[in-house]
Image: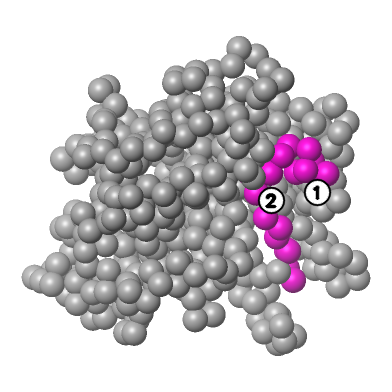
């Protein structure tokens, strides 16, 4: 990479972080003013450049509309109108899908410019999300500046000079590693590498291997699922792992108080949770007070709503949320529905940032899968890996995995109408075997894969829980 390009990347990221940091202390009115200005700019741009929004917002005045005037959209709308939503002429679903199907490294970008994520969802087809890389940098900069718990700015000189004279300080991302796996893992991995080189550690690797590689990498920051961090905390307390990260961020799963306490005890630093989704990048993160996740409201709107789409009262649980990343211009998603259940508070936080906070997120509906090995020990099979491997198969519209005993997974596949049943199920099996092998449990798990005409909803929440385990080892 040329020196000029590298410096420009670093300057961009630090600049975004500065704007983010200062913006967080603007006061409630100031933040609302910034987010409103950004929303109007985004809506105007979408109406001019996207035939879909031009039609959807017919009659809407970009200078005077209220947020609630804009009809929400969901995954089905997105995928049915993909080409008309995209604001870059020449970027077509067909080409994006072909590119997804090709083998490539996990940091690959389409046309050297776009990052593409593919997600499963609880209804309908998988969603395909496209970002300009800079849109991701900007979003991630907000999270680094505000959601790391300490003051990353005080670390900048150290990070910079270490990078110049010795090996730079690094970010270890322990997650499902793949070119189209999104949320925080994919986003952190796009930080310019000179600034903070990141290294992906597959969550499916054996615990011993991760520990050994982490000892060698000696990360400055760790981004990982809480369940994986708990394992690392045990290894650190036992002396097998010997690292001194300064920042630890959790993603994707609920961070329980006991896991948080254990991880903090092992590493001696605070653990901060993150709220992110492939559809809206990083939306909220914890400050050093750890009392809820501050929504980065000047760059991302999070609206908790009831079943009918009406706003819920402060502190009440929502049925779903509408999210709008105000920096996402290539594929604008304005008031996009996510099935997360959250409650939001506006109570002032002692840290001084006057943004609303999410008290809890309940939408993370994967159970952990434990496999019983031949010697009676248990190994954990990460649900995110299972999800990613099923979702990537072409022809899968939706799925559900149910584990009723430790050595068998029942996999129910809902096919796309035009998919070839036999071929798709074979592909699902091949893909799942890959993740089982990576985890070292291929001989301990049998797979029952069948196609179904409907996926069952949870009788209580009415949501689809995609990975359900009915067995838990008694530790
Ligand atoms: Zn705070």
Task: Please identify the quarter of the rendering in which residue 5 is found.
Answer: bottom right
Q: Residue shown at 64%/45% (left/top)?
A: 438
| Residue 190 x/y as whole percent | 60, 65
* Pick the front one: 135 or 38: 135
* Pick the front one: 190 or 287: 190
Residue at the disc numbered 2: 201
What is the CA distance from the residue labelled 1 to the residue labelled 2? 8 Å
Q: In the rendered view, does 450 fall on the left or right side of 369?
A: left
Which dot marks residue 462?
A: none
Q: In the rendered view, does 184 fall on the left or right side of 217?
A: left
Task: Please identify the quarter of the rendering in which residue 459 is found.
Answer: top left
Q: Residue shown at 19%/72% (left/top)?
A: 52
Q: In the rendered view, does 412 fall on the left or right side of 15?
A: left
In the image, residue 399 lies in the stretch drawn in magenta: no
| Residue 270 x/y as whole percent | 69, 37
Q: In the rendered view, does 74 fall on the left or right side of 196?
A: left
Residue 314 visible in rendering: no
Q: Secondary structure at mark 1?
A: helix
State the residue lying farthest toward the left.
59
Residue at the disc numbered 1: 213
| Residue 310 x/y as whole percent | 18, 42
Do labels 1 and 2 touch, CB within 8 Å?
Answer: yes
State which region is magenta. Answer: 194-212
* Pick the front one: 276 or 372: 372
Q: Secondary structure at mark 2?
A: strand
Look at the image and tell me in which quarter the C terminus lies. Answer: top right
In the image, residue 202 lies in the stretch drawn in magenta: yes
* Pick the front one: 25 or 149: 149
Q: Residue shown at 83%/68% (left/top)?
A: 163
| Residue 8 x/y as whole percent | 65, 81
């Amino acid at each position: 990479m040329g020196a000029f390009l590298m410096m420009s990347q670093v300057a961009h990221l630090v600049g975004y972080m500065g704007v983010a940091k200062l913006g967080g202390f603007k006061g409630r009115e100031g933040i609302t003013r910034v987010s409103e200005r950004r929303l109007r700019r985004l809506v105007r741009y979408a109406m001019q450049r996207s035939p879909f929004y031009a039609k959807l917002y017919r009659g809407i005045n970009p200078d005077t509309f209220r947020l609630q005037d804009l009809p929400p959209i969901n995954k089905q709308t997105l995928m049915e109108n993909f080409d008309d939503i995209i604001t870059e002429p020449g970027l077509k679903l067909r080409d994006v899908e072909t590119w997804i199907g090709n083998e490539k490294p996990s940091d690959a970008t389409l046309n050297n410019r776009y990052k593409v994520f593919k997600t499963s969802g609880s209804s309908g087809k998988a969603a395909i999300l496209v970002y300009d890389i800079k849109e991701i940098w900007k979003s991630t900069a907000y999270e680094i500046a505000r959601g790391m718990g300490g003051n990353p700015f005080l670390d900048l000189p150290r990070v910079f000079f270490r990078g110049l004279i010795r090996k730079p300080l690094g970010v270890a991302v322990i997650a499902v590693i793949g070119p189209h796996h999104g949320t925080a893992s994919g986003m952190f991995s796009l930080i310019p590498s000179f600034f903070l080189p990141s290294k992906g550690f597959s969550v499916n690797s054996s615990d011993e291997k991760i520990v050994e590689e982490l000892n060698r990498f000696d990360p400055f920051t760790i981004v990982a699922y809480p369940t994986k961090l708990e394992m690392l905390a045990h290894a650190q307390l036992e002396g097998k792992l010997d690292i001194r990260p300064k920042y630890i961020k959790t993603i994707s799963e609920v961070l329980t108080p006991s896991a948080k306490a254990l991880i903090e005890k092992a590493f001696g630093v605070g653990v901060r949770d993150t709220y992110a989704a492939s559809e809206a990048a990083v939306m909220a993160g914890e400050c050093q007070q750890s009392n809820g996740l501050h929504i980065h409201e000047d760059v991302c709107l999070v609206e908790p709503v009831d079943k009918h789409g009406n706003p819920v009262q402060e502190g009440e649980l929502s049925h779903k949320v509408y999210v709008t990343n105000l920096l996402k211009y290539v594929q604008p998603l304005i008031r996009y529905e996510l099935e997360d259940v959250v409650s939001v508070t506006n109570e002032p936080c002692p840290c001084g940032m006057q943004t609303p906070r999410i008290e809890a997120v309940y939408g993370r509906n994967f159970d952990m899968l434990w496999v019983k090995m031949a010697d009676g020990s248990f190994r954990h099979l990460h649900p995110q890996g299972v999800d990613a491997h099923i979702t990537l198969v072409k022809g899968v519209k939706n799925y559900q995995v149910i584990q009723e005993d430790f050595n068998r997974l029942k996999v129910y596949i809902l096919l796309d109408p035009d998919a070839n049943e036999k071929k798709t199920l074979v592909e699902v099996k091949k893909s799942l075997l890959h993740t089982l092998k990576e985890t070292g449990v291929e001989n301990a798990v049998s797979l029952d894969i069948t196609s179904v005409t409907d996926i069952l909803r949870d009788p209580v929440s009415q949501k689809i829980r995609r990975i359900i385990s009915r067995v838990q080892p008694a530790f």
